[in-house]
Image (tube, helix red, strand yellow):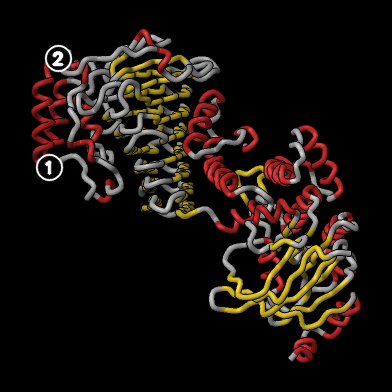
Amino acid sequence: MSALLKIDNLKVAVGEKPVLNGVTLEVRVGEVHAIMGPNGSGKSTLAHVLAGRPGYTLTAGSVTFEGHDLLSRAPEERARAGVFLGFQYPVEIPGVNNVYLLKAAFNAVRKHRGLPEVDAFEFLGLVREKMKFMRMDESFLGRAVNEGFSGGEKKRNEILQMLILEPKLAILDETDSGLDIDALKIVAQGINSLRAPERSILLVTHYQRMLDYIVPDFVHVLVNGRIAKSGDRTLALDLERRGYEWVSEEAA
Amino acid sequence: MSTALATRIAEEYAAASDKLPARVVSAARRELAVKTLCAQGLPATRDENWKYANLRALERVRFAPQSVQPAEAAPATPVSGAALPAPIEGYVRQTFVDGVFASELSSAARNDAEEGSPARERGQSGDARFALLNDAFANDAARLRIAASSDRPSCVEVLFVARTEGARAASYPRLDVKVSAGARLNLIERHVSVASDANFVNAAVEIDVASGARVTHFRVQQLGARATWIDTLNATVGQNASYQQHLVHLGALSARSTFHVRLAGSRSAARLHALAAADAHQTHDACALIEHAAPHTVSEQVFRGIAAGRARVAFNGKVTVCAGAPGTDSRQSLRGLLAGPEAEIDVRPQLEIHTDDVRCSHGATAGKLDESVLFYLLSRGLDPDTAQQLLKWAFLADVVAKIDIPDLKRSIERALAGRIDVAADLKELL
């Protein structure tokens, strides 16, 4: 299996404050990696840096995606190349219709891949099918993006977007936060349905409970902006039992 | 006001007075207006409520309207119907060119109603100084007298066409509307330019909504790129009556609206939904006052303004709750969007309450597009231009959506799309 994402000694600061202090990680095609860690360890920063959010300063290291430099590319180029970020806090966009955004995003990705645009009728069929799978009411089609959605509905909407865009690398930033157990199951089922030999997933999470439903191939613990420990899914169970402190101590 | 300006107004009035029709405004009222103006002066940008207005055109304007000047002073260009906006289905049209009724461009006869007494004397109704200027020089008036009749509302469009360059002659649209008890009126008032894009337009609108009547008033200002537009609107709303205005500022170099609605009868309601989209060196300024003067009255002010380029957009929304107006329910939502590094936005909510038992809420924001929202769209693969256009469009969407006349809404959407560079298929955006 070849490396889809290669992060090498990545150091990132917000203003003067270092947040990532040399992250090295390789995600091969088809793998599911979980990034865990205490609050403030840099998990979300890593997710956002990969997606191209402005406001971070790269101080050292590199990231390649399919062998090409990722960090020099604009956020929309990354998205079209197949990088998807599922937001921890999806934004509300009053006045922008949910299905319009889905279609605009879908066609932007297709255009990049050299595929023709899909007409409205065909597209609606696709969206309806995926919404059913995510157990979302059809009324969400006509609503503004995330406006007035509950926390769980917003997360489901993120996964819906992911199912439609079919990214090569899905980065899911604390998708489990704020979900009750039923919503968590639906969201996990959505993510699992995208598991495929040609697709990789990076799950960023604080708790191991999501990993009961989406079993990762690798688990990494991020402490103070560095990967302090890596292992298989049993590491996540250890963390749940023992907390994060022992990893920090071991690392120090 | 500079003495020079006052002197010029008085002189121009004296020269034109015998040609200004008394059926439009009586000579006594015109003279009083000139006298008051000379005493009070016209507003200047040092006045608190006028500091965002661009009044530079006053220095160059010739105040007497075209129709009272000798033909050689301001020769009139004929206006062809093809140059005017397409008619709106279901609406009769009265067209006024430089303030004067043009029957050949109208689908309805004019109304020869008598001059209405103003709802309030000028001066009692907030800032009416430009309305006084209209009183002095108005050469015609659109008078609508709406009686309660069938089950359907009366649907009237009054189209004001500014033709002459302001330096040659000013234009004084005058609209006087009385809606009888229980009657309903849907009124479209549009202002456009032909021949010259540098008109000076000073409009005065009086609206009297009697008890139980309902008026929905769509006002669209689409004047030419160098035009100056000033208007003063006064409305009085009777018991159980409602007045709703949709105000759209798109054109002109400088546009200023002064809006004063008095909720005079109990359980009456007033709503103002305003939008402005300014670019380049445009100024769009509005000063709106809703006065709750009776119990259990309801008001709403919604404003959405975008300033791009070096434009300035200002909205000063004031709500006054008088001592005799318990049970008032008032809501304000004022938002401005800065779409250029050199643009300027000023939104100001003001609330003055003189009684207990009121429910008043207001919110005002002015800022740039939210970076986190932009990033969200980019992270879904949209290019930055499309993302910004989409967000600007969305910013105005709720005000545009309330314009429930399909033909008019489409024409406003088309004009707006040009203003904020939306190239995408608009139907999909909505």
User: In the rendered image of this protein, does residue B146 appear above or below residue A235?
Assistant: above
Please, what is the three-letter code of the amino acid marked with disc 1? Ser
Q: A251 or B399: which is nearer to us?
A: A251
Quadrant where the N terminus of chain B is found in the figure:
top left
Asked if badges 2 and 1 are on one and the same chain, I answer yes
Is residue B212 visible from the viewing direction of this image?
no
| Residue found 80% across the figure and 70% down from its top | A26
Q: Secondary structure under badge 1?
A: loop
Q: B53 or A50: which is nearer to us?
A: A50
- Distance of label 2 from label 1 (alpha carbons): 27 Å
Name the spot of residue A252 as percent of width and height, x first: 73, 91
Q: A173 or B205: which is nearer to us?
A: A173
| Residue found 62% across the figure and 48% down from its top | B383
Q: Which residue is mark 2?
A: B70
Mark 2 vs mark 1, foreground winner is 2
Residue B261 relative to residue A56: left or right: left
Q: Quadrant of residue B172?
A: top left
Q: Secondary structure under badge 2?
A: loop
| Residue found 40% across the figure and 28% down from its top | B209
Q: Quadrant of residue B375?
A: bottom right
Q: Which residue is mark 1?
A: B2
Residue B298 relative to residue B138: left or right: right
Is residue B45 visible from the viewing direction of this image?
yes
